[in-house]
Amino acid sequence: MDSGSPYYVPAAVTVTAGGAIRWENPTPTHHTVTHDACFEDSGRCAFDSGAVEPGGAYTIPNLPPGRYPYQCRIHPIMRGMIIVTESPLLPSQT
């Protein structure tokens, strides 16, 4: 989240599997970071921050590779995408 609310900045991010992902809320308004699957009854909800207070933060410790569209439950216009890629092979692993 950024002070340009009601948008996530950046709106899309690509990360390598195994790393944490952190959102900070510098706005004067509560927001959420909610995986789109949490709105379905599929049991595949990967993350849901609940309300992140102004000045607060939310961290996901690890996600498996995949695409994770997300939004703010309070402000549905706020949408983003996390793309998690496989960890690259180290030279000793080839």
Image: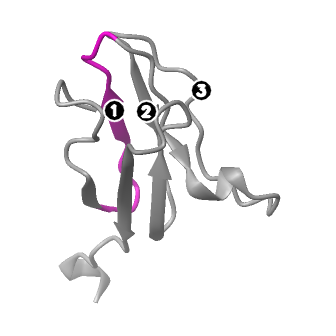
Where is residue 54 drawn, in percent x and y?
36, 10
Residue nearest the viewer, comparing 13 with 39: 39
Of labels 2 and 1, earlier in sequence is: 1
Residue 23's disc is 1
Residue at image coords 18%, 24% = 3
Residue 50's disc is 3
Residue at image coords 47%, 46% = 71
| Location of residue 59 with respect to 64 vertically, above or below | above
Q: Hey, what amino acid is under mark 2? A: Thr
Q: Hey, what amino acid is under mark 3? A: Gly
Report if the CB atoms under discs 3 and 2 are less than 8 Å apart. Answer: no
Task: Provide the residue span drawn in magenta.
Answer: 15-28
Where is residue 59 drawn, in percent x and y?
43, 32
Residue at image coords 50%, 56% = 63
Q: Hey, what amino acid is under mark 1? A: Trp
Of labels 1 and 3, earlier in sequence is: 1
Q: Quadrant of the C terminus?
A: bottom left
Residue 59's disc is 2
Q: Residues within 10 Å of mark 1 (few under 14, many from 20)?
A: some
Element under label 2?
strand
Q: Is residue 27 left or right of residue 3?
A: right
- Location of residue 31 (image quadrant): top left
Element under label 1?
strand
Where is residue 79 drawn, in percent x and y?
39, 50
